[in-house]
Amino acid sequence: MNLLAIDAACSVLSVAVSRGEEIFQAQTPAGMKHSELVMDLINTQTEKAGLKPDELNGILCMGGPGSFTGLRIGFSISKGLALSMSVPFVPVPTLECIAYQISGAVIPVIQARKDAFFFAFFKDGRRIIGDADGTIEQIAEVLREKIRENVKITITGPDAEMIFYALPDELKCFCGCLCKNSGYAKELILIAKNKNLFYNDNTAFLYSGPEYIRKTDAEINLL
């Protein structure tokens, strides 16, 4: 399948395009400029893949959690393109993409501001703990529980080092750190192909929105 994937969930913006089994990916530090940069990346990668827009079979984006603004941009552009080209659209959970292709027990993490992190727990590709919003101390409690089961755990994601180096020494010896400060658009495509995401009914996703977990500051201020 020819697929377009957009990852705007974190500070690094990435876009990937697949043509058959070949995947073309580009990324750039975006900060708060995802909306200014994303269309150029899409055009560049589709040209590299030798594809015209009407040759795409599906659009993917990060489903969250992640940057509130980045997720909204990813969803709006992805759904707009899917509707204009009459192709399916599918969001994929961000933490699942971060943990993808890492064997064993994995905790993917993204900084969520306010001294907290979005995290989940996977083992051999299966989700054990759903997406959560917690402090380093709360993540450490999850690690203690899993370590009692004699599990070696890999902490991964763009902010993995912040978690790892803040852990007590008795936990570090049971953990590994795989810091990847890059985009995960390629993983979006690999998951879609591995799980045959575009062989099901995808129309419902056109009415979906990002998974935020935490309320925005504006929503909190209204309470």
Image: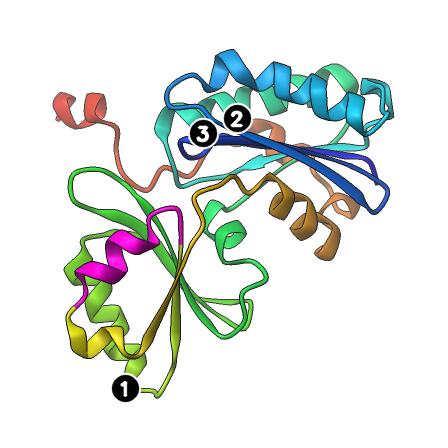
Closer to the camera in the image, 172 or 2: 172
Quadrant (top left/top right/bottom left/bottom right) for the N terminus: top right
Query: Do residues under tags 3 and 2 come within 8 Å of each other at their CB atoms?
Result: yes
Local secondary structure at mark 3 = helix
Question: What's under tag 3, amino acid-wise?
Answer: Leu
**Residue 164 forms part of the magenta stretch:** yes
Image quarter where the C terminus lies is top left
Query: On the image, numbered disc 1 is attached to which residue?
Result: 148
Give, as a single range, the part of the protein colored magenta: 157-167
- Chief SS of the magenta region: helix
Task: Examine the structure image and report whether residue 196 is included in the region drawn in magenta.
Answer: no
User: Where residue 192 appears, x then y in whole percent?
Assistant: 69, 48
Q: Could you tell me residue 24's position as x and y percent? A: 73, 36
Return the residue at label 2.
74
User: Which residue is located at x 30 percent, y 55 percent?
Assistant: 161
Q: Is residue 136 left or right of residue 17?
A: left
User: Residue 72, position in %: x, y?
Assistant: 45, 24
Up-down relation of residue 56 to residue 196 (above or below): above
Relative height, residue 216 to residue 120 (above, below): above
Q: Which residue is drawn at 33% across and 48% down?
A: 159
Amino acid type assigned to the residue bearing label 1 in the image: Arg
Identify residue type, mark 2: Gly
Q: Please say if 78 is above or below 113.
A: above
Apparent side of residue 165 relative to residue 210 in the rendered image (left or right): left
Which residue is at 52% across, 39% downward? 183
Under circle 1, the secondary element is loop
Marks 3 and 1, how far apart in space? Answer: 36 Å
| Disc nearer the start of the sequence (1/2) | 2
Q: Residue at x 46, y 32 (%)?
A: 12
Q: Is mark 2 on a helix, strand or loop?
A: helix
Q: Which mark is residue 71?
A: 3
